[in-house]
Image: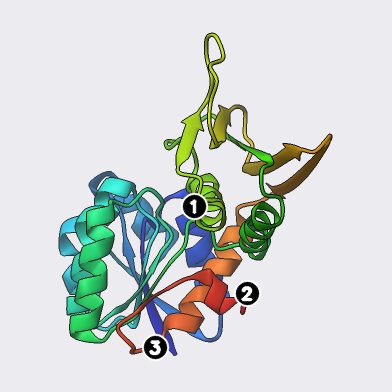
Amino acid sequence: MINVVVGGATGKLGRMVCQLILEDSRMDLTGAIVSSQGGNVGKELYPGVVACGPDAVRSCLADADVYVDLTTPDAASRLIPSIPDTNTNLVVGTTAVDEEAVRSLKEALKKTNNSALMSANFSLGVNLFWRLCEMMASSLPGYDIELIDIHHNQKKDSPSGTAMEAVRAMQAVTGIEAVRHGREGKAEKRGREIGVHSLRAGDVVGDHTVIFAGNMERLEVTHRAVSREAFARGCVEAINWIADKRDGELHSMREVLNL
């Protein structure tokens, strides 16, 4: 049985992940990390499960095999570098985590020989979408690349972590360094760049489209999520995959999905 503690357990995705863990015969939800305002909610949602605030995370992880972070960028950046010291493996689904925190996490993993997995998106479709973006960018040299990400009007970060992961994948195979976030005013002569445009409206779960244009043609690759459950199910598979790893490395969903 895999003992799991979930951070951000009262958030939209966190609730789904917790519910799937409770339904999974391979796992046991042993802890729920909630904000100071969400303590009572946590106890109501997960009776019999230890619910604690951010300051008590280490004690909550005493018997945990995997800690799942679905919190906020600031909270995750402060917390995740210290998780390997608790001898707990880690799954990070929080986007926009500080780069210094990621470097510190990698150092801590090597010291403790624990393992972690980080992904801006756990869904199978999105991970294939990233791979397709990489392949198309590599196969279409000289084509202009524009990315559009659409999410609900309450999303905190723009662009989305999923969008920026696609950008990084395409930069790696094209050598394009410049990223233009939106456009305004008169157009100037520009070199190679990737344009990124974020729309925030209604209750859109998450749409991402990358446009490749050139040579008198246009190709588009799109991923649309109709429910957050697609992300939650992938997260549970990531938990199962990372639970018994002890290699001191930071992994990705590509490895889970054999991409």
Quadrant for the C terminus, please. bottom right
Residue 192: x and y in percent read 55, 36
Alpha-carbon span between mark 1 and mark 3: 27 Å
Alpha-carbon span between mark 1 and mark 2: 17 Å
Tag 2 or tag 3, which sits nearer the N-term?
Answer: 3
Q: Residue at x 53, y 66 (%)?
A: 19
Q: Which of the colour schemes (rainbow, by chain, secondary structure, one colour) is used?
A: rainbow
Q: Residue at x 76, y 43 (%)?
A: 220
Q: Say above or below: 10 vs 91.
A: above
Residue 40: x and y in percent read 31, 52
Q: Residue at x 47, y 76 (%)?
A: 239
On residue 259, which mark appears?
Answer: 2
Foreground disc of the pair 3, 2: 2
Residue holding disc 3: 245
Amino acid type of the residue tagged 1 in the rendering: Arg
Question: Is 34 displayed left or right of 93 in the figure?
Answer: left
Q: Say above or below: 232 vs 48.
A: above
Q: Say above or below: 125 vs 192.
A: below
Image quadrant where residue 8 sits: bottom left
Residue holding disc 1: 168
Question: Is 105 displayed left or right of 216 in the figure?
Answer: left
Amino acid type of the residue tagged 3 in the rendering: Lys
